[in-house]
Amino acid sequence: MSKQIVDAKAQGSETQSGHGQPEMPLTQVRTAHKCMPVSRANNEGSKQAISLLVDGIEHESIRKLAIAHCHRPELIENRIRQRQWTAKRAVMTPEKPKVHFLGKTYDSHMALWEAYQRDEAYQNKTCCYSTFAAREKAGHPLEICLSAERLHRAATIKVRGELFATYAEVARRYGMKPSRLSRLMKKMAVEAAIDYKEPTNGKYSEKFFVRFPEIAVSIGVFYFAQIDFTEFTRHKIGISRLSGAERLAGVCHDIIAEWRGPLALLYRLEQIMLVEYARLLKRGPDWFDGRTETFFDASVGG
């Protein structure tokens, strides 16, 4: 009897398809299903080809596209693959300027926040990124944006024995524009910012940089430009914390070259060039700010 039952079970385990093949165990079916290759056509169809065509030129790779348009390859790679930007938008959108805070430079506001999050000394004193971004967008100084304290408590500021609710109040108390105080505080403490005076007529000096070391290491611009006055043309060199175009916005000019670097270093370079080409110095018109660093072209006369 027991033998007949075993034989019946063996016959029942065969498939009903008529082929007489034993049915595959359930675990084996699942394993086989997982190993089945995904349709190549479906997989390829789900991916869209990336076009690297910009201004009629098809580039071989994202790296070559970035180099051709003077961008960092990793920046363009991120914009095209992660953000899914078009190639033209990726190379035509300028990179955000660096963030300068307390003598250090960061690639972005997020990089600044992440640096303070990683620093054990600030981990419990730094707010979450959404709070940081909201405060930064509202125009608060970076030290307030980073603070983990509530805004109304963090903004209780003591300056020279006086308490202020906001830095805008500090600025008005000392006869400054809030925007100017905020800009200076990115490079120096609030009391140093209050005392800071712009060099007369844009003139810097070694003594000035000794007094304000934060300004000495801040990034500036050394520019070489051609300026077209009504009666004549002059070449000009100069240093500024603005771009050459911003510095010369009030006159007809053409920027020939620009270099960026620490302001004190650019100042020394400017002094060397003024001595080197002293024979070509030719003052600009009296109304022009920066007239002492103008030159004429010796090949064509002044």
Image: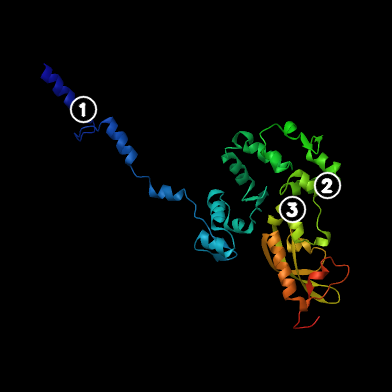
Please say if the residues under marks 3 and 1 sit with CB atoms less than 8 Å apart.
Answer: no
Kindly report which numbered mark, 2 or 3, lies closer to the viewer in this rendering.
3
Q: Residue at x 55, y 51 (%)?
A: 78
Q: Secondary structure at mark 1?
A: loop
Quadrant in the picture for the N terminus: top left
Q: Which mark is drawn over residue 177? A: 2
Measured in 3D between alpha carbons, the distance from the residue under mark 3 to the one under mark 1, in whole angstroms, is: 90 Å
Measured in 3D between alpha carbons, the distance from the residue under mark 2 to the one under mark 1, in whole angstroms, is: 89 Å
Kindly report which numbered mark, 2 or 1, lies closer to the viewer in this rendering.
2
Q: Which mark is drawn over residue 13? A: 1
Q: Residue at x 59, y 56 (%)?
A: 90
180 lies left or right of 14: right
Lower position in the chain sequence, tag 3 or tag 1: 1
Q: Amino acid at mark 2?
A: Lys
Instruction: Tell me where residue 207 sits by quadrant.
Output: bottom right
The single residue placed furthest to the right in the displayed view is: 286
Q: Residue at x 39, y 49 (%)?
A: 40
Measured in 3D between alpha carbons, the distance from the residue under mark 2 to the one under mark 3, in whole angstroms, is: 20 Å
Kindly report which numbered mark, 3 or 1, lies closer to the viewer in this rendering.
3
